[in-house]
Amino acid sequence: MKKSRRIFGIMVLFFCFLSFPVNHVFAASGMAEVSLRVTQNFAVKNPAKKMDFTGNYEFSALDKGAPLPEKAENGKYSFSLEGEKAELPIHLQYSHAGVYQYRLIQTTEDKEGYQYDKNSYQITVYVKNSDKGELHTQVVAEKENGRKSGRLEFQNFYQGKEPDGSDPNGSNGSAGYGGSSANPVKTGDSTNVTPYILTAAAALLLAAVIVFVKKFNRKKE
């Protein structure tokens, strides 16, 4: 029975190690290291000559005493990623068992033509003591909607102007970006056609009345 429990425990631990793409490294005796990989992707439509593929990010500790990278300040580690596809590892070292919570967000300022992924990730690192006195780690990441995520990934988007010079929303250049003209297009003919329409409608109504009267008189005869 004890042997079965050990086998089951090993299988669960193995699954936890595969459930999230992090590197579990034992930095030294009594220390454990976790490497979280943050990925940035930019999708591009109508590329321009100059495009800025810089993304700014913030990794913060939600618990006091939670380890952070060396360059962190005031409980926050700020960093940037450059390029359409970029990746950066965040190294964390643990010396004690416990549960450590973090948050990862993108802080890039909005710019015309760019859309930035504003999803936030809540990351929980479980550090446990093994039977041999070593530290084992498990990482669980969830998006703000509560769904677990196997990757710390941000999908950004850039949309330039159309080749004919129109803006991304499809309006012409005279209306401005995202705008539209408030005045209708004039054809040059300002004739008021309302009287003609009313005259034609009256003629049709009179013809219908005449036909009805004729049919009614025939039935009487």
Image (cartoon, rainbow, N blue to C red):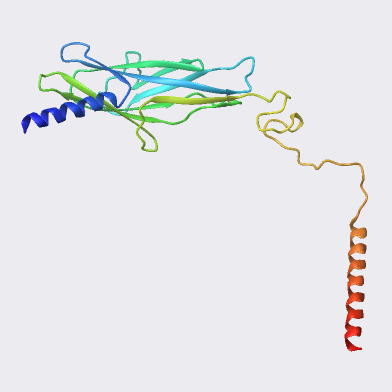
- The image position of residue 172, as x and y in percent, is 74, 31
In which quadrant of the rendered view does residue 130 lie? top left
Judge from the rendering whether residue 190 lies leftward or rightward of residue 167; answer left or right: right
- The image position of residue 133, as x and y in percent, is 11, 19
- The image position of residue 215, as x and y in percent, is 89, 80
Q: Nearer the viewer, residue 176 or 185?
A: 185
- The image position of residue 64, as x and y in percent, is 26, 26
Outermost residue to the top: 28
The vertical placement of 166 against 214, above or below, is above
Q: Nearer the viewer, residue 72 or 154?
A: 154
Judge from the rendering whether residue 79 lies leftward or rightward of residue 3; answer left or right: right
The vertical placement of 145 against 110, above or below, is below
Q: Nearer the viewer, residue 69 or 216?
A: 216
Q: Nearer the viewer, residue 145 or 111?
A: 145
Q: Looking at the image, which residue is at 72% across and 37% down?
A: 180
Q: Looking at the image, which residue is at 89% across and 72% down?
A: 208
